[in-house]
Amino acid sequence: MAGIEKNIKPAGGWQSDVIADLIRQFEFPYITLNPGASYRGLHDSLVNHNNNEPPMLLCQHEKIAVQIGHGYAKASGEPLCVIVHNVVGLLHAVMGIYYAYVDRAPVFIIGATGPMDEGKRRPRVDWDHTANVQGQACRDYVKWDYQPGGVQGIGDSFARAYAVMMTEPQGPIYMCYDAWLQEDTLTESVKLPPKNTPRVASKIAPEPKALAQIADKLVASDWPVLMPQYVGRVASGFDDMVGLAESIGAAVVDVHSRLNFPTEHPLDCRLTPKVFNNADLIVGLDCRDWEGRTHYNDRVNRTMKAHYPDNCDWVDIGFADIEISKWAMGYQKFPECSQRVLADTELAIPALTQLITARVKDNPKLAKKIQERATAVKEIHDKNRAKWLEQSKENWNNQPITCARLATEVYSVIKNEDWVLTTNAFEDWALKLWNFDKGYRWPGKPLGTGTQIGMGLGIALAHRNKGRIVLDCQTDGDLMFDLGALWFASKHKVPMLAVMHNNRAYYNDWEHQITIAEQRGTPVERAYIGMDIFGPEPDFAQVARGLGWYAEGPIEDPNEIAGAVSRALEKVKQGIPALVDTITEHVG
């Protein structure tokens, strides 16, 4: 049996070389960054000690750098290294860090601070850029943050940070390095993490007895519903969900934080609240947002009504209350379950499937019950898909263009390609009309405004060398936050096809103002004030061309969509990012 191999870095060079060595040792594929003088020592080590391996990818804003790491992690399962300037750079980055935390995306964020030794600080600027505890700015929404006090603490804390980040439930970490620590000479040897030791601990396995009890509940149930949220975070999760659903003949309602189940599978009942009406058992699978799919939300009165009956039983398999913020409340309302099993669904779902299969074997009555239920679920699935297809034809020739028409026209062009959709699913019309037949087709739903273009670029970067067409349904308000991100795709040759869902408004908020106006009896026609993006209307195609993209638009006639998308697709196949600006309806 091989023992632990020593990994000693001898004296010589610069202390920032130690950090650079670790970035290379832990095999980050890229570094995204916005430059800053606080890590000039590390920057030099990355360029000259590491010879720019892994390559540094320049971004226009720290938030974009984090979001590219966020999207890359969702699409590939691998983390990027992201480097941000000290106090001011970290404050720019915090929204990206927060959303990576909410979305359970592993991102290894490195920051810096001015010298903690007052005698090494330059006048004014180093004082402005030094915080007493810099990690405090993001501590409530990272899994861990640390600032080593000396060069001997760099290796141990780096390894711990990587392990914490990649251990489920995953999330971002923040490491802060003193500017003078980086720039000082390395006068002593440094012990680094051994290269042949595991970087992450093994996964959490379910308690056998508890999992067997859930299997018993499932086989006894008359109408179980499976509700996965983050199962698809691993490549095997998509197929594992198919195996579990088929073993028990249960409807699956995807919560969409990742793509957990194929849209055209006969047991798929996403976006179908009525499937819960007769449920006697709901199984949450790595699911925290258990109320959103299972309740009617009265947005005016802020009340909810359950779609499921009062006697419905609930069980949960997942990470329970591991890693919840003490500040942000993304952990949701505490679920009322008869049983909660702490386990990684990557292990628990195949094990549960085996338990069910064993119970069904040699039990023809149970097998018949499961088959009959699967047939009933298929009828619901088929009726939904047919209904959505008919609904998509409504207002077919409208101007502004309907999202259903836009989704249909785009799919007609890309459906025979090996395609990937980034975040916004054409306001769910892609999920209703397209065939999401592989787990990598979509890494999950969009998050808040000002996140999508960065995440989309990270997703495109992850698929860049795989021969896939990455499509971004790009909302206008989101792009206005981060127009500079378009330059990243041109500079670093990241081909992506962006089709604008341009309704010239922050319409999600506009719709909220309509709701309040209707409730209060104030003029609905004034709800647009402070929400519209016109007068002037941004010319996204012109901006994109100025930043190195191929672009067409704005397109108002839906009959022109397919031609424009086809031309743009040819450019993307040549490695050129392309944007098609389409003027769309307000979606309520």
Image (cartoon, rainbow, N blue to C red):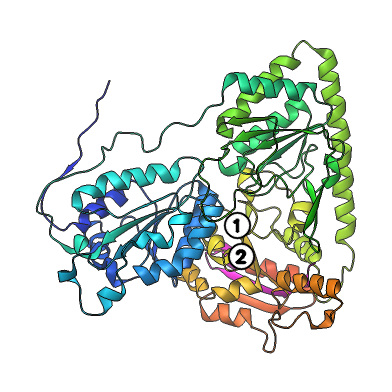
Q: Which of the labelled discs sits on residue 497, or is there none? A: 2
Do residues under tags 2 and 1 come within 8 Å of each other at their CB atoms?
yes
What's the amino acid at mark 1? Ile
Give the residue displayed 28% in from the left and 59% down from the top.
Answer: 177
Q: Is residue 23 above or below residue 511?
A: above
Near mark 1 (Cα within 10 A), the count class, few <14, some 14-19 or many ≥20, is many
Secondary element under disc 1, as helix, strand or loop, is strand
Q: Is residue 59 above or below residue 266?
A: below
Q: Nearer the viewer, residue 14 or 142?
A: 142
Which residue is under mark 1? 469
Q: Residue 109: percent from the left, percent from the top?
A: 39, 57
> In 3D space, how far apart are the residues under numbered discs 2 and 1 (Cα atoms)?
8 Å
**Label located before the other in sequence (2 or 1):** 1
Give the residue displayed 71% in from the left and 54% down from the top.
Answer: 415
Image quadrant of residue 450? bottom right
Q: Which residues are magenta?
A: 569-588
